Image (cartoon, rainbow, N blue to C red):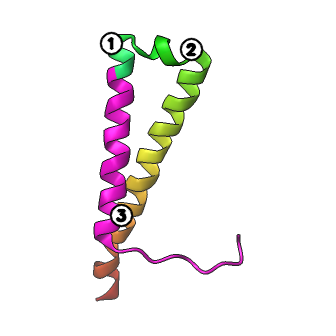
Amino acid sequence: MAGEPPVHTSVDTVRKWHSLAERRRRHFVELYRSDRWRRYYTEEQFLVQMREVIQNVEAWEKVLSHRDDEPARLQ
């Protein structure tokens, strides 16, 4: 979808998605610390999921920091 225009979302929406990603990351950290992940995943599956969760949080942090910088650039 390289030809599609960028989607503009509100800062509040971005913050909500970032918050959700953070909650999911905390959940995976708790699964790891408690060793409960072994009930649901193989080690390889869990590592893949954990990487995706971390990348998701980092992506939303990048979008959020970009959105927070926008008003400063407009002035």
Q: Viewer-proximal residue, 62 or 19?
A: 19
State the residue at coordinates (31%, 70%): 11
Position of residue 30 measured from the top left corner of the image (x, y, whole percent): 32, 22
Highlighted range, magenta: 1-30
**Image quadrant of residue 66?**
bottom left
Q: Are marks 1 and 3 in contact (CB under 8 Å)?
A: no
Q: Given the image, on which type of amino acid does mark 2 rest?
A: Glu
Q: Which residue is mark 2?
A: 43
Classify mark 2: helix, strand or loop: helix
Q: Which residue is mark 1?
A: 34
Q: Is residue 5 magenta?
A: yes
Classify mark 1: helix, strand or loop: helix
Give the mark nearest the N terminus, 1 or 3.
3
State the residue at coordinates (35%, 25%): 29
- Near mark 2 (Cα within 10 A), the count class, few <14, some 14-19 or many ≥20, is few
Position of residue 46 measured from the top left corner of the image (x, y, whole percent): 53, 22
- Relative to 40, say whether 64 is above or below: below
Q: Are marks 3 and 2 in contact (CB under 8 Å)?
A: no
Q: Which residue is mark 3?
A: 14
State the residue at coordinates (45%, 77%): 8
Q: Given the image, on which type of amino acid does mark 3 rest?
A: Val
Q: Quadrant of the C terminus?
A: bottom left
